[in-house]
Amino acid sequence: PGYVPLVDPGASSVVLGRRLSAPLVSARFDGGAKSLDDLGRAVLWALHHSDGDSLRRLCVSRREFEQVMWREFPESRPATGLTAEDAWASIDRRFLAGLGGAVYEDGGRPLQFKRVEVYESVRTYRNFRLHNGLVIVATNERGEEERLRFVRAAAERKGRFKIQSTTD
């Protein structure tokens, strides 16, 4: 009794999966890859060399997340009380765990790239596209096909692709 729900003019963004009021931004992604296949090749190179720092550079940076992506997600609307800093803290921990686990599991292995598959969806936002449900398909030294699933999503912005989410 007496409860009055918050006024949330952006509530429809939850159903849409994106905020329509997000501003157009000019910032670019630094580094990354020119295609999903190039991103997959770069990931396998970094794994082969057990190079966690190179893997991390393939990920969306804090600046890119805050300036380009955050304001498009429904969670960014004022009624949630969440900030880009809150969201980044979660994403950053997931990157650390996912990349560390991948280097531990597959580091040092010479995997030959075959393709990247997107098995969920490609979502178009105002300032970027999100490729969800990625699988990097490669062959191992015995010629057997392997499917790496630790890269969960990639963000695409102005011809650059970067890891946006990993398993943790």
Image (tube, rainbow, N blue to C red):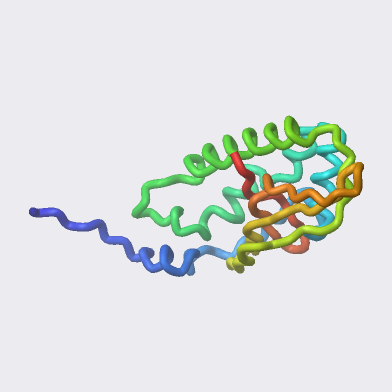
Q: Quadrant of the N terminus?
A: bottom left
The residue furthest left is: 1
Asked whether residue 128 is in view, the answer is no
Residue 123 location (% of width, % of height): 60, 66
Q: Is residue 135 above or below residue 103?
A: below
The reply, left or right, for residue 108 in relation to residue 78 is right
Residue at position x 45%, y 59% in the image: 74
User: Depth check: 135 or 24 in front?
Assistant: 135
User: Depth check: 7 or 137 in front?
Assistant: 137
User: Residue 36's quadrant in the figure?
Assistant: bottom right
Asked whether residue 92 is in view, the answer is yes
The reply, left or right, for residue 50 in relation to residue 94 is right
- State the count of labels: 0
Residue at position x 72%, y 51% in the image: 162
User: Residue 12's quadrant in the figure?
Assistant: bottom left
Q: Is residue 27 above or below residue 87?
A: below
Residue 127 location (% of width, % of height): 62, 64
Residue at position x 38%, y 54% in the image: 78
User: Residue 7's quadrant in the figure?
Assistant: bottom left
The reply, left or right, for residue 127 in relation to residue 12 is right
The reply, left or right, for residue 103 in relation to residue 78 is right
Residue 106 location (% of width, % of height): 78, 36
Q: Quadrant of the C terminus?
A: top right
Residue 77 location (% of width, % of height): 41, 56
